[in-house]
Structure formats: structure tokens, C-alpha cells
Image (tube, rainbow, N blue to C red):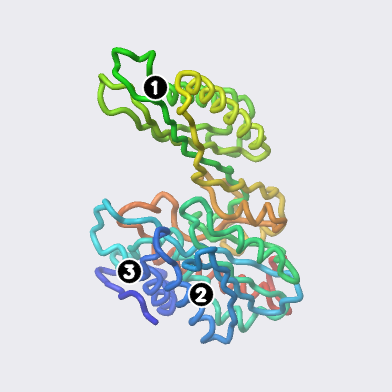
Amino acid sequence: MAAGALRTGTETSSVEPSAGLLRLLTDLIGFQSVSAVSNLPVIDYIAAYLAQHGIDSRRIPNAAGDKASLLATIGPADRPGLALSAHTDVVPVEGQDWSSPPFTATIRDGRLYGRGSSDMKGFLATVLAAVPDFVRHATARPVHLCFSYDEEIGCAGAPDLVAATATLPVPPALCLVGEPSSLKVARAHKGKFANRLVITGKGGHSALPHRAANAVAAAAKIVVGLEAIGASLTAITDAAFEPPYTTVHVGSLRGGGALNLVPDRAVLEYEVRTIPGADAAGIRARIDALVAEVRAGLKAQAAEADITVEPISAYPGLDTPAGLPAAAKLARLTDCNEAPITLAYGTEAGLYDEAGIATLVCGPGDIARAHKADEWIGLDELASAERLMRRLALTLSDAPTDPLF
């Protein structure tokens, strides 16, 4: 079953995770489960591991059948319990300068390096390492293991898994999404939608621009319009976020090839990140109206001109009330009494929240290390997360000393 090999260098850490957790994380990192390929090998591995502990799991495949989410329940399914959510995919490593093989777990100086170590196979391995504890202690409430695919390309694989979780005979009372938050409890993050606009004009000689339709000029009008929409949204603020308003961002604009030619094609990509309570539908409608106006002007120059919209990603924000009792209780279990924080990045948590499941984000590692060369997670961070999992297992028992619910 093993998929990876552990490399060790100088190892210095006062608090270390169990050998079982390190083996699991080593194996998980060994699966090159980038979003562009099938995640079935890592799902097969997880399902086999759960089966070894007597746990049945359910696969939720995509339409093509080459990817799947996994859902498993430990404990009494007829009672509300805890859902633990993680994604199995990672981002690519091409073009990055790694000092050790990215898909081989390597320990040096108290850190475990490898793609996905922080985002978020560290949490996934921690959950799996705690399965024996869950089997032993989840007697009064169940724990549901919810593992998705394609989170890194806009939470594309989570909706079916979330729907299956929300329609369990008894839905979870709380979902914990283990994205890297330095084990701080997070209650909210912005929502996001992003699109690609393909602008088709009509080419021609730059000396006769009136006979053509300039796709780059049309794209520039859209950029100016998007900037204006973004500026208008700064008036509505939420101080819990940085920046404290909804943002509109143009990430790329490509078009044209020679100065003396009127460009007949341009591609523009933009994203909108909305604070909780923002009228996302209204913002979409304003952008749609902008694009329609520019399209009409372009078509007036050339009948064959057009603008097509290609969705890139979309997920809802998370807006769990700061006073949710479970948030303070979870913070106590992490040995941190800080108030819940908000996140600058998005997660699958908003989908669970939208489905009516109270949701928090809390996981080991740091998002600042994610997606980069030499991604790492501290051995002490893994040990702390492992301790949290053991405590969560005890909260599901018949007589918990420190109940979560």
C-alpha cells in the first residue's frame, strides 16, 4: 500500500508526531495527486486503510469516473456528530526549484517537506492516524470523514460530497475543515467567483482600423469597467477582513501580436472576492451588463465579433457566527483561547455552511507555505494536530470530560 518513502536529514524537534502519522503522511505525499490527474490511487489507499480498521467507505465519483470523493462514518449514524473535511488534490510542482523531491517526504531540522504537507495532506494524515481513537471512543456521537477532489481548482469536486454529507440520515452538528490555519479556529472567509472572457474581434491593417474590430481595445474597456465596479464596492465594509471590502481583480489580459495589425482576439481573466453579506448575484449582473454593452459595441463594428464567458471557479464564503459555542470549545481543545479569526483564502467550508452545517476551519500548517517550492509542515505542528484529534475523539464518547457539543 505504501506510496512514498521517507527521507531523513538532521531531525530536531522537542515534540514529535507518532510514527504511524509520519508513515501515513509519507505515503500520502508519495501520491502525485495534482488536480490535473485522477485521484483514484490515493482514494484507493484511504479506502483500504479504513477497511483495515473495519470501516466501510462510500465513493462519490465525478461524471467521467476518473475521480472520486470518499465519505465514511465511524460511530452511531443515527445521532448528530462531527464531520472532518479534507481535499486529496495538490497543486503542480512544474517550474519550481525544490531542494528535495517534492513527492517524497523529507525530514530535516524538525520540518517535513513535500508537496501537500501543509495544504493539506498533513491534516488528512492526522485524521487517518486518529481512526483507531475514533473507533474506540466515538460511541455517543459519530465522526464523518469527508475527503474531496479538485479543491485546488475552485472547490470543483466538493458539491456532490457536501450534498451527500448534508443528506445523511442525521447530518453532522459541526464540520471541521482542516485547511492550514496554524491550528487557529477560523469562522469566516470571503466567497469567490472567477471567469475567463474570450473576446473575438475582426483583424485588419492598423492603417484601416475602421474596417476592423479591435479585440484588445474591447478588453481594455471591460478592464476599466471592472475597476469601476470594484471601486464602488469599497463603500461596504467588514472590518473582520483584509481588505475589509469586496474586491474585483483582473489577473491577466492577453492579445495582439504586432503593432501594425488590429488584434482579432484577446483573453481576459478576472475574479471577485466577496465579503459576507455582499450581493454576489447583483455584482454578477453588473459585470454581465458591462460585458453585454462592450459586446454590442464590438458587434456594431463586425457582425462576427463576440465575447464568450468561461467560468473558472466559484465557491461561497463562510460566515459562521463568532459566538458559536463550538468555536470557543474547539479553541480550548487546541490549547488556544483566541477569538475565532477570519481567513484571506477560500475553502470548501462555505459549501458546508451553505448546506446548513455549522462549519469552522482549523488545521495544522501555514497557508503561506502552500503552493510553493519546499512546502513544509513542522513536526511539532503535526504533533499538536494529533493531540487535537485524540481530544476530539474523546468528545464523541459517552462521558466526555470536555464536550465539544
Q: Please give the label number shown on residue 333.
A: none
Residue lying at 48% horizontally and 58% vertically, measured from the top left: 150
Question: Alpha-carbon distance for marks 2 and 3?
Answer: 17 Å
Vertical comparison of 390 with 180: above or below: below
Residue on which the image places disc 1: 214
- At label 2, counting other C-alpha atoms closer than 10 Å, the crowd grade (few under 14, some 14-19, many 20 or more) is many
* Image quadrant where residue 264 sits: top left
Vertical comparison of 326 with 77: above or below: above
Vertical comparison of 239 with 2: above or below: above
Tell me the SS state at disc 1.
loop
Question: Alpha-carbon distance for marks 2 and 1?
Answer: 55 Å
| 92 and 79: which is toward the camera | 92
Quarter of the picture containing the N terminus is: bottom left
Question: Alpha-carbon distance for marks 3 and 1?
Answer: 51 Å
Residue on which the image places disc 2: 128
Residue lying at 57% horizontally and 62% vertically, measured from the top left: 334
Q: Are marks 2 and 1 in contact (CB under 8 Å)?
A: no
Q: Amino acid at mark 1?
A: Asn
Residue on which the image places disc 3: 105
Viewer-nearest of discs 3 and 1: 1
Precedes in sequence: disc 2 or disc 3? 3
Vertical comparison of 76 with 96: above or below: below
Q: Are marks 3 and 1 in contact (CB under 8 Å)?
A: no
Q: What x and y, as percent, mark residue 363?
A: 52, 60
Precedes in sequence: disc 2 or disc 1? 2
